[in-house]
Amino acid sequence: MLKPEIEKVLNKQIELEASSSQYYLAMATWCESKGLQGTSNFLYHHSDEERMHMLKLVKFISERGGRVIIPALVQPPTTFDSIEAVFNLVLEHEVNVTESINNIIDVCLSVKDYTTHNFMQWYVSEQLEEEALARTILDKLELIGADKGGLYLFDRDLQELSTQVIEQP
Ligand code: OFO
């Protein structure tokens, strides 16, 4: 049986993963409207991944006899200042997610829930990768600056990345 403290933080994480998925979906549609098809596909995939992160939590709570709360949707922004702004927001968001995951780990240790602690290790490594990826993308964008040809190649790179980063649940 899940302890109430754990059920609470896991449900909060479900909300955060769901809102990440919505947020990246909004970014994907914005990039698509700017002709950045590769970047858009990358973000569509990223949005799918976040939904998968949410589902893993939903199933884990259910399997442990807890109560899942499916959160209401919050409308993400419809427009963004630039592609750099998009990825700065991605990084900022992922850093928040990491903090939230670290908080769950703290709660697991404080109530001695080693099963959830073990389950959350997957999220710890996932966050490491996601933050690193967002930083790499931002470095590339800084390198490109205002070079339109560079942006074209960047978009092509992200198209390629979008087929690699998708994971199986
Ligand atoms: Fe990228 O947030 Fe999920 O875990």
Image (spheres, rainbow, N blue to C red):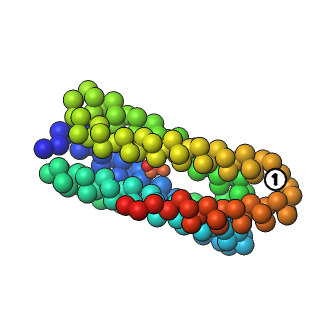
Q: Which residue is mark 1?
A: 144
Residue beneath the point at 71% across and 57% down: 83
Q: Is mark 1 within 8 Å of ligand 1?
A: no
Residue beneath the point at 80% across and 48% down: 143
Give residue 39's position: percent from left, percent from top: 65, 64
Q: Is residue 149 left or right of residue 24?
A: right
Considering the image in quadrants, where does the N terminus appear? top left
Q: Is residue 112 visible from the viewing direction of this image?
A: yes
Q: Is residue 90 above or below residue 112?
A: below
Is disc 1 surrounded by few (<14), some (14 to 19) or many (20+) residues within 10 Å?
A: some
Q: Is residue 59 above or below residue 37?
A: above
Figure label count: 1
* 9 or 61: nearer the viewer: 61
* 121 or 70: nearer the viewer: 121
Give residue 116's position: percent from left, percent from top: 26, 41
Considering the image in quadrants, where does the C terminus appear? bottom left
Q: Is residue 10 above or below residue 75?
A: above
Give residue 23's position: percent from left, percent from top: 52, 59
* 158 or 58: nearer the viewer: 158
Q: Residue furthest top?
A: 110
Q: Secondary structure at mark 1?
A: helix
Residue beneath the point at 31% across and 52% down: 57
Residue beneath the point at 28% across and 28% down: 109
Give residue 112's position: percent from left, percent from top: 21, 29
Disc 1 marks which amino acid? Ile
Q: Is residue 78 visible from the viewing direction of this image?
A: no
